[in-house]
Amino acid sequence: MNNAGQKILIVDDEPDILELIEYNLKKEGYQVFLASNGQEGISVAKKVHPDLIILDIMMPKMDGIEACRLMRAIPEFKNTFMVFLTARSEEYSEIAGFNVGADDYIAKPIKPRALVSRINAILRRNTGTEEVSENKLEIGDLVIDREAYLVFQAGQKVVLAKKEFELLYLLASKPGKVYTRESILKNIWEDSVVVTNRTIDVHIRKLREKLGETYVSTVKGVGYKFELS
């Protein structure tokens, strides 16, 4: 696999973890950069402009959650993939990570082959979505036209309500990215006081009824994501 042009920054305060991940990603041909805390991670990121950043959560000086939040506020990192390393018992940390803009998480203890596979998949996420115009997406057998509020599946028109369409477009615009309930509410319903989590669940159920079960998956305790079929 030719990954020579892609840069990955690893931010972790454990030298053994840094060495393990660095070794396995370099074997895949990635350019790898290292930092030992959140502050240093931001500094290095500004210099090398990585395609993907791996962040541990618990670190001295600045933790991964805060580092991710600060970098997401910088325009040049708006579309940079950010992945957290989490212990299996840290579900609350996973939710916090997604809330500040994380794209995914990798559970500890780290299994090298699984880690490499996950990183490869994350960096391929955008390749399955073709933006044929500014407001149109083609994903598999789906065509989603934001300007006309139309959806076609295998050439057949699918009728969606306005909010169903907006929710589908949000999820499909970044396949594989997990959207928390909070971010969905903010993006789709903004500041409406009558909307609850139940409202999101109902709209997801209707999308699945109309498009099938394969496109939108649930990430337990966090939110939803669009799957490339």
Image: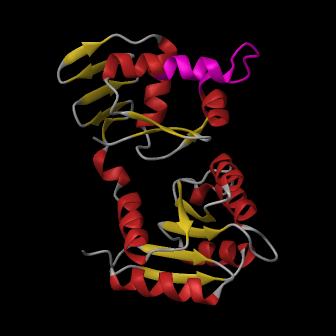
Residue 74 visible, this angle: yes
> Could you say which quadrant of the image residue 54 lies in?
bottom right
Closer to the camera, 34 or 132? 34
Q: Is residue 171 above or below residue 8?
A: above
Residue 216 lies left or right of residue 64; in this view the side is left
Q: Which quadrant does the C terminus fall into?
A: top left
From the top left corner, tell me how far across and down residue 196 is, in percent. Answer: 69, 20
Quadrant position of residue 107:
bottom right
Left or right side of 87 for 21: left
Q: How is the image coloured?
A: secondary structure
Asked if residue 147 can be seen in this view, the reply is no
Is residue 197 a member of the stretch shown in magenta?
A: yes
Per the rendered image, the range of residues in magenta is: 188-204
Q: Residue at x 52, y 59 (%)?
A: 80
Q: Position of residue 73 (x, y in %)?
A: 69, 53
Q: How many marks?
A: 0
Check the image and name the residue furthest to the left. Answer: 155
**Image location of residue 137, percent across then percent down:** 33, 34
Q: Is residue 83 above or below residue 1?
A: above
Residue found at the very far right of the displayed protein? 61
Q: Position of residue 50 (x, y in %)?
A: 51, 71
147, above or below 86, in the image: above
Residue at 68% x, 58% y is 90
90 lies left or right of 81: right
Name the image quarter holding the N terminus.
Answer: bottom left
Residue at 37% across, 52% down: 125
- Residue 116: quadrant of the picture: bottom left
**In the depicted view, which residue is nearer to us: 47 or 92?**
92
Please tell me whether residue 119 is drawn above or below residue 74 in the rendered image.
Answer: below
